[in-house]
Image (cartoon, helix red, strand yellow):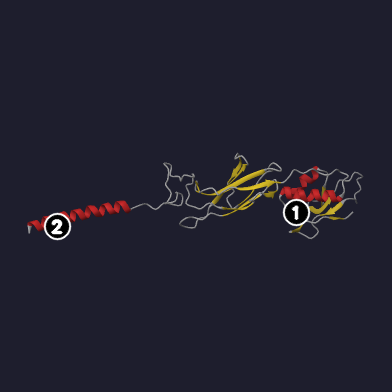
Amino acid sequence: MPMYRTFSAVAMSAAVVGLAATVACSSSTPAGPSSAGSTTRLNDNGAAPDGSTLKASAPTLQSPINDEAVSLKPTLVISGSTGRYVAQAFSYEFEVQTESGTVVKRETPGGTTWAYPENLQPSTPYKWRARATMNGAVGPWAGFGRFITSQALTAPAPTASAEEWRVYFYALIDVKGVGPNFTFGALAALRPDLNAVGVDVQHDSAGNLRPRLFLPNPGHDPFKNAVDVGENGQNRPWTWVVRF
């Protein structure tokens, strides 16, 4: 009996030690949304090798990609990232670089669309990418998309034909990124450029714009070179109907 009691105590002690070791080895604290993936080795700063600290996939670049021709103020569009374990509402950081990799601008507009706020250089290739952000953490960058900006515009001479002005007008719409449909907001965006080359936009006494342009008119004839550009109404394709 004494031998039996001694053996039982030793066995129980060994079992307790084994159980404690098993629990210690298997326990882990689940990572929150702002930590790197469980299958990725983290560095001393808690970031994955690519610098990401957010458990999310890279977003998918939608437009512009594949050397697409764009205006000097392009709109960049992505489809959003996915949280690895739970659905999350992410913000997004966009970055535009030169061909050689110099960062031109980086902003976090929040959503999945970013209208570039100023003119880029004409006839120039650029590349861009985006990543998810949340509470100061960042996800992995998407691969680069590439686009090429349109050429700089040269306005026709004041005595140019209405057809020459039509070509210029539609090129300006592309450069300013206000196509394909007429709106008064788009016309207001074009107005400074049109006025700068001698084209006037009709307006009423209160200053409200009307969808009619007056092309440069060296003779100052009030009934010459009037062109309607939105005769079909708002959110319809731009028109070019020469009236006088």
Total count of labels: 2
| Disc 2 crowd, CA 10 A, few/some/many (<14, 14-19, 20+) | few
Q: Which numbered dot is residue 184? A: 1
> Disc 2 designates what residue?
8
Query: Which residue, as the protein is rendered here, is positioned at the far front?
Result: 66
Q: Is residue 5 above or below residue 43?
A: below
Taking depth in this image into account, of 111 and 164 the one nearest to the observer is 164
Q: Nearer the viewer, mark 2 or mark 1?
A: 2
Amino acid type of the residue that numbered disc 1 sits on in the rendered structure: Phe
Disc 2, SS: helix
Give me the residue at 39% from left, 53% from top. Answer: 30
> Would residue 110 be found to the left or right of residue 158 on screen?
left
Which of the 4 image quarters holds residue 6?
Answer: bottom left
Residues at marks 2 and 1, CA–CA distance in whole angstroms: 91 Å
Q: Is residue 180 above or below residue 158?
A: below
Which of the 4 image quarters holds residue 122?
Answer: top right
Image quarter in which the C terminus is found: bottom right
Amino acid type of the residue that numbered disc 2 sits on in the rendered structure: Ser
Taking depth in this image into account, of 109 and 170 the one nearest to the observer is 170
Give me the residue at 87% from left, 48% from top. Answer: 161
Tell me where residue 76 appears, x and y as whole percent.
Answer: 63, 50
Q: Are marks 2 and 1 in contact (CB under 8 Å)?
A: no
Q: Which numbered dot is residue 217? A: none
Q: Earlier in the sequence, mark 2 or mark 1?
A: 2
Give me the residue at 8% from left, 56% from top. Answer: 3
